[in-house]
Amino acid sequence: MTFLFFSDISWNNLWQRPHHFASRFARNGTVLWIEPIVLGQWPSLKPRSIDRNVVQLSLPVIPYNARNKWIRFLSHALSHIASFRRFVRFLQNAILRRALRALGIDSSNTVFVIQNFHFAHLVSSHNPAYVLFDYIDNAFGFVDLPDHCGEEFASAVRRADAVTVTSRSLEAEVRRHRDAEIHLVSNGVEFNKFASPEAADRPRDLPEGSPIVGYVGSVYSWIDFDLVDFLCACVPHVRFVFIGRAHPQIAGQVSRLEQRLNFSFLGFRKYEQLPQYMKHFDVAIIPFQRTILTESVNPVKLYEYSAAGIPTITTLFSDELLSLNDLIFVARDDDEFVKHLENLLQHPLDTMHRHRLVAFARSHDWDAKFSLLDSLIRKSRS
């Protein structure tokens, strides 16, 4: 079986849900990983093998989410011209057709797995055997998108044979455009990797001599930087360590935090290295602001922290967190966040609580999540 996997992100990006699912689809067939061209990165305009049974292809898109604000402005302006949008779609279709011919793939025998709704129009010209739309984040929460993008999203939802979402909030958003069943498939974790990391020396760039409060993930505008600064000031004997790729727009915020003697920003680390860092965390945090984006987020890091048995403190960025109140510590304001942190540093989790955390993570292993998607596809083809 051949899967055309239309991703929002590059294969070389931080390893996330798209990579976990694509690599598992590749166990039973060929995956053509289709990603948007990103300015500043060399595109794969011809199919290129990048992993076992995984072939990469880059397609042009209108860069609404470009890091440069002037490119975003120009993209929005040009996108209002219908002929420009048609030209971009023409290029996408032409490059994809050429790639399929080169690989000897008949698109009518493929499964489309769509996470990037801007590619959903390709369904009509390629007529795949099955279309799965996996909606993983609120696409309208990153930047303001033109009205026609809302129409594209609604069309993507209606075209799909099955729709999966990562949270109830996203389910409600999709429900406005779809009467058929919507399947909740939350995020997960490679349980064994994080629960039992391979023996290795302590990372040299990890501070020593103080308890470590860690954060792993994208460092973007949804981080509550004022809260992090407040934590650094209130708990000076702790080292706050952030690991992840920072967006240029918030470079100033990170620089401000780095003025604190107990804050360390280590930058991007490969996915394989993360368990070696996490095993030295005393407490993990998710200091998100509450926004239209984060209200529907189902953070992968929560499952990774839990698999490692690390107590987690989070802001109340989503009401769905309240269902996990017996496992994690949800702070409704900055003072409560500090209170939770000081309490955990003075009174570490008991063994029973850690076991419950680990059991929670085990039940959300990526293999179990993938089997839900796989069963939807197999059921339709049986």
Image (cartoon, rainbow, N blue to C red):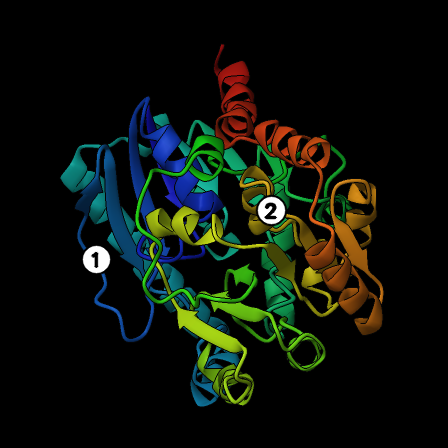
Q: In the image, what residue occupies the spot 50% across and 68% down?
A: 242
Residue under numbered circle 2: 310
Q: Nearer the viewer, residue 143 or 186?
A: 186
**Amino acid under label 2?**
Ile
Q: In the image, what residue occupies the spot 58% across and 57% down?
A: 152
Query: Residue 360 location in percent, x, y?
Result: 66, 32
Residue under numbered circle 1: 44
Q: Is residue 315 visible?
A: no
Query: Residue 168 location in percent, x, y?
Result: 76, 44
Query: Residue 173 location in percent, x, y?
Result: 74, 51
Category of crowding for the residue at label 1, using alpha-carbon neighbours closer than 10 angstroms: few (below 14), some (14–19), many (at least 20): some
Q: Find numbered disc 2 in the image and state the secondary structure of the residue it sits on.
A: loop
Q: Is residue 189 left or right of residue 165?
A: left
**Amino acid under label 1?**
Ser
Q: Residue furthest left?
A: 102
Number of disc labels: 2
Answer above or below: position of 31 versus 249: above
